[in-house]
């Protein structure tokens, strides 16, 4: 925010008119450690300034326009002396005319949307956790008896659960989340994204004495997921607009309480949430202009600087070499041959079978005879599919060595509609695991057996598919020759997945959480489905005495690496 304010020649976050998108007026806290700081609550009944607005409508803010900005900026610059310029600048929140205003097609402030990364994951989320734990900037805030505060031991358990839960979350979902209490300094924006949208709903469930704070947090998570989705409709923009308006009003009600002594919670980033919908409507989804790619590029430059005596020369040389390499790639068509970076969306080397164009089967590879019980389940699955009696299929599989794969990669489409590597799913019985590896064997799949009966151990068989969750064990290939020997009408190769499902599932509508439970610590018996019925990878988190939950991706983040790139350079 300060950097953009400088570019726009505006007063910025501590001005009397601090917002670059609207003309909301800031008010002084008067109490606390920063009595001269301006804050921007919607409601300010104590404001004693004449003709001041006592309450702003979050959906009808006094927005700035490009024409108005130019007029006010010129008015400031036409001041006869410094004193008059200061007064005019104070009245408008503008220091002068930005050189960027001369660029054709640039509109202020529309062309400067708020950066979602810093706004949410460097400001709003840390503020909420600091309020709940009475730490950092809010260590002395309030009376210490508010009902939104988390007990110290509760916060410790939540913080300790974060790094442990990450071992059960595939690396494709994002980075490892450190302990937010002991290793706060290591929390990156990406880690806070995962903490808020993946871990938070499960770890905070049932932790507050008053559940309205949990519901308020869940509403924020829903809005975040909508904002970072790959496609956003105009109807969703309207939902985001109304959603943030209500969320900010509830935030002020719960934490600010119209108390001038608590004004410090009404920061400019909180107010900026009210402009997110306008930013999306004008500039597109937030991932198209958030700061993740730039932050990572800066990190790459930092790592490229090896010289302590001449750091800038080292960085300059690195930037020049990268630019030269890029031009060589483009001029001579050597993009793939000269690619130095590890592409996280590579298609792994493996085998693709006919009728499975979107799946690649990857080592480890085994050839073995399966247990009789598993052969029977494969026969029961395959018989109706190929139109052959189950008994005949079972007899053909008896003592028959089959090809078994340990990994399967799903292929996705890039922005240019080119096939790129997606989720790599492990078969837990084939791929050896370890405590240092992040689990990538649990999946969401389509099944005819419903396990959405929390208190009953028996499954219900449906004619249609229903969503289920479990652990992939292996991927078994039934070759076309074996199918042909059964005289089936369609002698082709079939690949089936063997999955150990969660025996009990239930959905918590209020938080969009799926809870699962094992049967005496065990999964349900192996289930055989076609490999195409596996939908995606999932993560898991188990909370102390609060149950076990499925973690699923609900936005573009984790499906495509929108933290690194937003367009393809080729």
Image (cartoon, grey):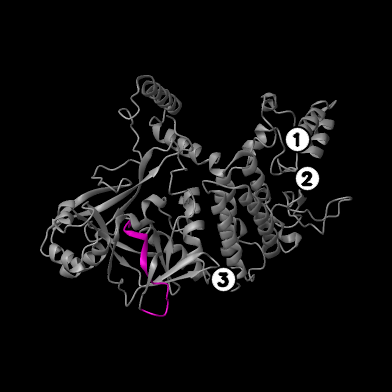
Residue 354 visible in rendering: yes
In the image, 218: left or right of 446? right
Mark 3 or mark 2: which comes first in sequence?
A: 2
Where residue 322 sits: x, y (%)?
A: 40, 26
Disc 2 crowd rating (10 Å Cα; few below 14, some 14-19, many 20+) is few
Q: In percent of the image, x 64 and y 71: which residue is there?
A: 145
Residue 46 quadrant: bottom right
| For marks 1 and 3 on the same chain, the one whose residue lies earlier in the sequence | 1
Q: Measure the C-alpha gap from mark 1 to mark 3.
A: 43 Å
Q: Position of residue 344 (x, y in %)?
A: 36, 42
The answer to whether 522 is drawn above or below residue 537 in the figure is below
- Residue at far right of view: 50
Q: Is residue 21 left or right of residue 533?
A: right
Task: Identify residue for label 1.
Answer: 94
Disc 3/disc 2 C-alpha distance (Å): 36 Å
Residue 178 vs 466, above or below: the answer is above
Q: In the rendered image, which residue does mark 3 sit on?
A: 208
Q: Answer yes or no: do the residues labelled 1 and 3 have beta carbons within 8 Å?
A: no
Residue 39's spot in the image, x, y percent?
Answer: 72, 51
Q: Secondary structure at mark 1?
A: loop
**Magenta segment boundaries in residue numbering:** 439-457
Q: Local crowd at mark 1 within 10 Å, few (<14), some, or many (≥20)?
A: many
Q: How many marks?
A: 3
For the residue pair 170 and 134, the one nearer the viewer reads as 170
**Residue 296, magenta (yes or no):** no
Q: Please, what secondary structure does the residue beneath circle 2 have? A: loop
- Kindly report the distance in space between the C-alpha atoms of the residues bearing marks 1 and 2: 16 Å
Relative to 374, residue 493 above or below: above
Q: Which residue is mark 2?
A: 62
Q: Quadrant of the C terminus?
A: top left
Task: Tell which of 559 and 352 is nearer to you.
Answer: 352
Question: Residue shown at 76%/47% (left/top)?
Answer: 24
């Amino acid at each position: 925010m300060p950097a953009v304010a400088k570019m726009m020649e505006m007063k910025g976050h501590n001005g009397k008119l601090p917002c670059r998108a609207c003309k909301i007026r800031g008010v002084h806290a008067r109490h606390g450690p920063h009595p001269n700081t301006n804050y921007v609550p919607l409601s300010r009944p104590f404001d004693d300034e004449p003709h001041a607005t006592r309450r702003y409508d979050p959906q009808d803010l006094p927005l700035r326009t490009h024409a108005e900005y130019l007029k006010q900026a010129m008015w400031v610059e036409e001041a006869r002396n410094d004193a008059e310029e200061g007064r005019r600048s104070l009245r408008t929140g503008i220091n002068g005319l930005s050189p960027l205003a001369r660029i054709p097609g640039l509109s202020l402030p529309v062309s400067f949307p708020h950066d979602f990364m810093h706004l949410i994951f460097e400001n709003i989320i840390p503020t909420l956790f600091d309020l709940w734990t009475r730490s950092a900037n809010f260590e002395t805030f309030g009376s210490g008896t508010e009902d939104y505060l988390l007990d110290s031991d509760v916060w410790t358990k939540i913080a300790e659960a974060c790094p442990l839960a990450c071992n059960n979350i595939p690396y494709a979902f994002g980075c490892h989340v450190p302990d937010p209490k002991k290793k706060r300094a290591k929390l990156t924006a990406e880690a806070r994204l995962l903490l808020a949208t993946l871990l938070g709903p499960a770890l905070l469930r049932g932790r507050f004495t008053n559940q309205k704070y949990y519901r308020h947090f869940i509403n924020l998570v829903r809005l975040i997921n909508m904002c970072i989705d790959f496609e956003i409709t105009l109807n969703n923009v309207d939902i985001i607009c109304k959603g943030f308006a209500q969320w900010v009003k509830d935030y002020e009600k719960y934490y600010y309480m119209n108390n001038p002594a608590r004004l410090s919670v009404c920061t400019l980033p909180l107010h900026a949430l009210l402009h997110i919908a306008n930013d999306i409507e004008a500039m597109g989804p937030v991932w198209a202009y958030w700061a993740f790619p730039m932050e990572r590029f800066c990190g790459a430059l930092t790592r490229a600087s090896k010289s302590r005596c001449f750091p800038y020369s080292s960085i300059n040389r690195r930037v020049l070499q990268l630019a030269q390499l890029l031009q060589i790639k483009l001029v001579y068509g050597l993009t793939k041959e000269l690619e130095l970076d590890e592409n996280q969306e590579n298609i792994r080397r493996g085998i693709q079978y006919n009728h499975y164009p979107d799946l690649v089967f990857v080592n480890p590879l085994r050839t073995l005879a399966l247990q009789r019980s598993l052969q029977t389940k494969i026969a029961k699955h395959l018989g109706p599919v190929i139109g052959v009696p189950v008994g005949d299929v079972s007899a053909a599989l008896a003592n028959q060595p089959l090809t078994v794969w340990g990994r399967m990669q799903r292929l996705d489409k890039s922005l240019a509609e080119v096939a790129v590597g997606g989720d790599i799913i492990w078969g837990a019985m084939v791929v050896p695991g370890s405590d240092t590896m992040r689990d990538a064997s649990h999946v969401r799949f389509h099944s005819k057996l419903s396990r959405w009966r929390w208190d009953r151990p028996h499954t219900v068989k449906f004619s249609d598919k229903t969503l289920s969750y479990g652990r992939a064990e292996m991927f078994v290939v039934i070759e076309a020759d074996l199918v042909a020997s059964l005289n089936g009408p369609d002698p082709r190769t079939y690949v089936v997945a063997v999955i150990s499902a969660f025996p009990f599932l239930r959905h918590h509508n209020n938080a969009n959480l799926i809870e699962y439970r094992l049967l005496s610590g065990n999964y349900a018996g192996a289930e055989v489905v076609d490999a195409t019925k596996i939908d995606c990878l999932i993560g898991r988190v188990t909370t102390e005495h609060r149950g076990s939950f499925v973690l699923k991706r609900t936005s573009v983040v984790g499906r495509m690496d929108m933290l690194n790139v937003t367009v393809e350079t080729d």
